[in-house]
Amino acid sequence: MRRFFRHRAAIVGMVVFVLLVLFSLLGPLLWKYDASDLNLGRYQPPSVDHPFGTGQIGDDVFAKVLSGTGFSMQIALVAALINTAVGVVLGSIAGYYRGWVDSAVSRLTDLVLVIPTFLIAAVLSRSTFSTAELSQGGGSSNWLQVAIILGVTNWMITARTVRGMVLSLREKEFVEAARALGGGPGRVIFRHILPNTMDVVIVNATIAMAQAVLLESALSFVGLGVKYPDTSLGLLISENQNELLVHPWLFYFPFIFIVLISLSVNFIGDGLRDAFDPRQKRVRA
């Protein structure tokens, strides 16, 4: 990992990401205002008492950004975990079994790749939330639903990457030796093949997390993402999109935190890619 720590952008990204995690975890406990607290000072610009200003109903924007950052990051993390799990399972099955299994998984991957991820997520979100509102009467927490939707609609690149690696690794001598010793497909895949793909899988997971932050923000912006009583940075932007020219702090602070999360995770991913593949680093340099 020494190569990673020589990657300046990755170090900056890691520091920013850790600070964002601490910000979202400890901030709500230490900050004097809660996201639901109201006061008579509506639309106050940033000040010492309210560093990010106040909103339409006197709510503290700093407290809301604290809460929104936490929700956005946990949505991105859960989505990336689901994305990675689905992609690894489908890719490893396709690459190991080949034949009609590989053909079926590859056709499914190609089909889903043709359709924009945002469109698939929007359709699933709309149908899922409509059903939930009818059964629960609305007003229930839905951040986990958003995370699951983002996870199951953005696994294709991971699956395709893992498939290619498994196709190559399955012909290696150590894999053939494992099969000769009686290892079943599941044991061979998970004990001998997948450990040799973890570097690429980890890098893809960081990319998936950054994409999930942006996708969640886009869904929330059009009203198909996180809903009250939950919050997210994308929802804060959606709620304040009409305030951009009049009260710009309501829009800019959530936007800045979305950019910080996305860039920090991308920089970490770049550092991991260079650390795991030094040849790529020399080429890029």
Image: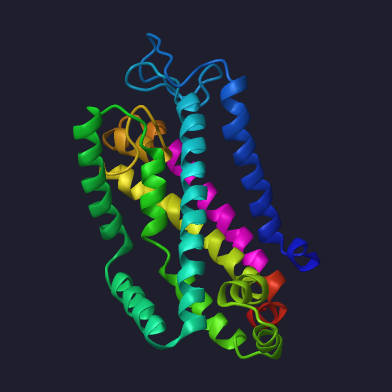
Residue 269 belongs to magenta span:
yes
Q: Residue at (54%, 55%) from the top-left corner?
A: 263
Q: Residue at (52%, 82%) from the top-left corner?
A: 96
Percent coordinates x, y for residue 132 in the rendering: 25, 37
Q: Name the image quarter holding residue 100.
A: bottom left
Spot the residue most to the front: 182
Question: Residue 71 versus residue 163: which sits nearer the camera?
Answer: 163
Question: Residue 76 versus residue 81: which sits nearer the camera?
Answer: 81
Q: Name the image quarter holding residue 211.
A: bottom left
Q: Is residue 25 left or right of residue 177?
A: left
Q: Is residue 212 left or right of residue 243?
A: right
Percent coordinates x, y for residue 48 in the rendering: 56, 19
Spot the residue most to the top: 40
Q: Residue at (41%, 47%) from the top-left corner?
A: 147
Q: Name the image quarter holding residue 245.
A: top left
Q: In the rendered image of this protein, does residue 16 appear above or below residue 49?
A: below
Percent coordinates x, y for residue 5 in the rendering: 77, 61
One can see residue 52 in this view = no
Quadrant location of the C terminus in the rendered image = bottom right
Question: Residue 232 versus residue 6: which sits nearer the camera?
Answer: 232
* Residue range highlighted in magenta: 253-272
Q: Residue at (32%, 29%) from the top-left corner?
A: 140
Quadrant location of the N terminus in the rendered image = bottom right
Question: Residue 170 versus residue 277: which sits nearer the camera?
Answer: 170
Residue 219 belongs to magenta span:
no
* Count of numbered circles in the view: 0
Percent coordinates x, y for residue 240 in the rendering: 32, 33
- Colour treatment of the image: rainbow
Report the predominant secondary structure element of the magenta stretch.
Answer: helix
Q: In the rendered image of this protein, does residue 147 appear above or below residue 201?
A: above
Q: In the rendered image of this protein, does residue 28 appear above or below residue 179?
A: above
